[in-house]
Image (cartoon, rainbow, N blue to C red):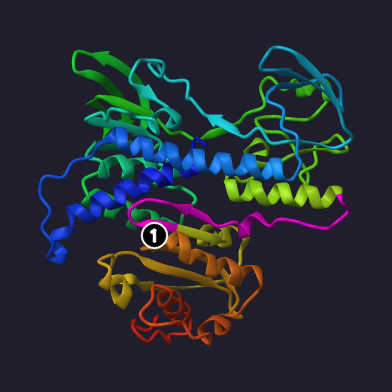
Amino acid sequence: NYGCVPTKSLYKNAEVLRTIYNSGEYGIKIDNYSIDIEKVQQRKARIVNQLVEGIEKLLLANKIEVIKGRVEFIDRYKLKVTKEDNSTLLLESKNIIIATGSTAQIPPIEGVDLEGVYTSKEALGFNRLPKRLAIIGGGVIGMELACIFHSFGVEITVIEYEKQLLPFLDKDVSIRLASSLKKEGLSIHTATKLLAIEENNLGLLLRAKGKKGVLTMEVDGVLIATGRIPEFKGLNIDSANIKHNRSIEVDNNFMTNIEGIYAVGDVNGKSMLAHSASHQGIAVVDHIMGIENSIDHNLVPNCIFTFPEVGIVGQTESQLKDKGIEYIVSKFQFPANAKALAIGEGQGFVKVIADKKGYLLGVQIMGPHATELIHEGALAIKNRLKLEDITSTIHAHPTLSEAFVEACLGINGEAIHGVARR
């Protein structure tokens, strides 16, 4: 557990700190608070251990044998396991599932091996917070950790090579998020390439090239968050003649070029999301059992735990433009939603994209609990629901879910608490 769960544990700590910091807005005065990073890490470890132990108990209850060790292919359907005591075990099966995940991608930049340069795995275990932290990469990992550590009181600078943060989002959503984060005090440099990391008397010196030329900055730590790459080094998959490039190549059933050998999750490079990996695993088991099952990766929700949260599912405007598909866009702003205002989180919007016939094609949400709200959009797109199926379903008041209904109503200029789309 070096990703989803530890990050969300720290995210909750950050949320609590933000609530305390803004407590004056609610008529509550709180003075002299501080963060105990050691206890923060202890809480994270407890949560991770509880989940890991729960999985171990489930495996035991279902009579699934677990062998701990290093594994490698010695033939297409033969594996050698070197156990923790260095003894070896040979296994043979006509069905093998590779699910070895991914590892941090380290760019070939001068100074990435210096002390004070971290990957996300190391940053999640910080027992002492750096005063100034540069984050290289404005993707999901980089932006989530940027928001968490900024809430912990760390001075954050983000350097992103692409023209916008979270490049898979539509430009308007990315720009709005960047604007919100800059107002909170994060320093963000897009279209900027890191050139080198050097040591100096005050910590680390970064040199980067951006829109206005070369810039330098002094920091106490650097977090490399330039993405992840499939991890299958050491498996010796060439002995099984399994095709691979940066990832293990698979078909629509997640089978490799070798009959009966599958690869699921990050290692096949399809989605790089834990929930996608889980469903791929289910699909593979179904395929082995002769049950038809498939996954449409356009329908996999992507959730970004920034402040505010972002959720996305379905197709984006840029994807639809590339395909030449006509579409209509509607947005509903959270400042017009009663629940959002009541909980003090009235920023952001719900954006829906529909075709000319009224079928939902994509949803992007930036705002309170976006990572929960996005699933109504996923359900609607998967089941080919029309906008009227959503708008005719009564949503309770006051709830954040009303914003989704209003955005859908807005496609036809019928939003109740918003200006008609022109």
Residue at 70% in and 18% down = 83
Quadrant in which residue 144 is drawn:
top left
Specify whether residue 139 is in view.
Answer: no
Depth order, front residue of 60/264 = 60
Q: Is residue 156 magenta?
A: no
Vertical comparison of 275 with 400: above or below:
above
Magenta part, dominant SS: loop
* Residues shaded magenta: 289-310
Vertical comparison of 8 with 239: above or below:
below
Quadrant in which residue 268 is drawn:
top right
Give how far across and how far down residue 196 sits, in percent: 35, 20
Give how far across and how far down residue 79 sits, in percent: 81, 23
Residue at 32% in and 43% down = 148
Give the amino acid type for the residue marked by disc 1 in the picture.
Asp
Depth order, front residue of 47/383 = 47
Give how far across and how far down residue 184 sits, in percent: 22, 50
Depth order, front residue of 87/282 = 87
